[in-house]
Image (tube, rainbow, N blue to C red):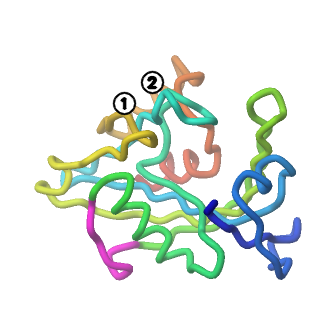
Amino acid sequence: MEEQIDILNADGTPAGYSRGRTEVHAKGLWHRTVHIWAFDSKGRILFQLRSRVKENNPGLFDTSCAGHISAGDSSVNAAVRELREELGVHKSSRDLEYLFEAKHESVLNGGSYLDNEYYDVYKISLNDDEANSLVPQPGEVDSFTWMTREEFFAKHKLHPEKFVEHPKDYLWLMENA
């Protein structure tokens, strides 16, 4: 069965119903997701290289981990689940630091994938053992890359096409990471 996602009104308030992920993106229905930025003990930022078989943004560098909030679930529970699934990291909700909410609209794949979302952004610190034993989720993540803030902004400036665009996240990284 396809993942069900709670639908929002354009102002971010709950619409009171859920739909399958395919319909959500075919119709551009507003929904909630999470972004998690992981940092190691040296202050480096973890970027995932999205799987080359992903429907949207294949083969691009993206947030450390991210995902949809399933119908009836909470933001923080979804973040903990995504850390486990995409990175192989087991953390509790107490380990996550909530940063901010953002709104994002994008049209992908020639207009066949409409992504209208409100997303909660979290920060997590990984100890050296966790940072050195990440397990990419097959079909979701091909690999991981650690970058200092300076390395990220230099690479992003030279090759923005190699990154999924998250302007609000990147502004936070510039000012706070």
Residue 62 has which mark?
none
Chain part drawn in magenta: 89-96
Name the residue carrying label 1: 151
SS at mark 2 in the image: helix
Residue 18 placement: quadrant:
bottom right
* Rendered location of residue 28, percent (x, y): 84, 51
Compare residues 24 and 102 and report the one nearer the observer: 24
Which residue is at 20% across, 51% downward? Answer: 131
Which residue is at 77% across, 40% downward? Answer: 113
Is-magenta flag for residue 91?
yes
The reply to whether dot 1 and dot 2 touch (C-beta < 8 Å) is: yes
Which residue is at 49% across, 76% downward? Answer: 76
Q: Is disc 1 surrounded by few (<14), some (14 to 19) or many (20+) residues within 10 Å?
A: few
**14 on left or right of 38:** right
* Rendered location of residue 55, percent (x, y): 62, 35
* Rendered location of residue 147, percent (x, y): 32, 36
SS at mark 1 in the image: helix
Name the residue carrying label 2: 155
Our reading of the magenta stretch's main secondary structure is loop
Q: In the picture shown, does residue 118 fall above or below 128?
A: below
Residue 166 placement: quadrant:
top right
Compare residues 99 and 29 and report the one nearer the observer: 29
How far, Cα to Cα, is label 1 from label 2? Answer: 6 Å
Q: Is disc 2 surrounded by few (<14), some (14 to 19) or many (20+) residues within 10 Å?
A: few
Is-magenta flag for residue 148?
no
Query: Label 1 is placed on what type of residue?
Result: Glu
**168 on left or right of 36:** right
Query: Label 2 is placed on what type of residue?
Result: Lys
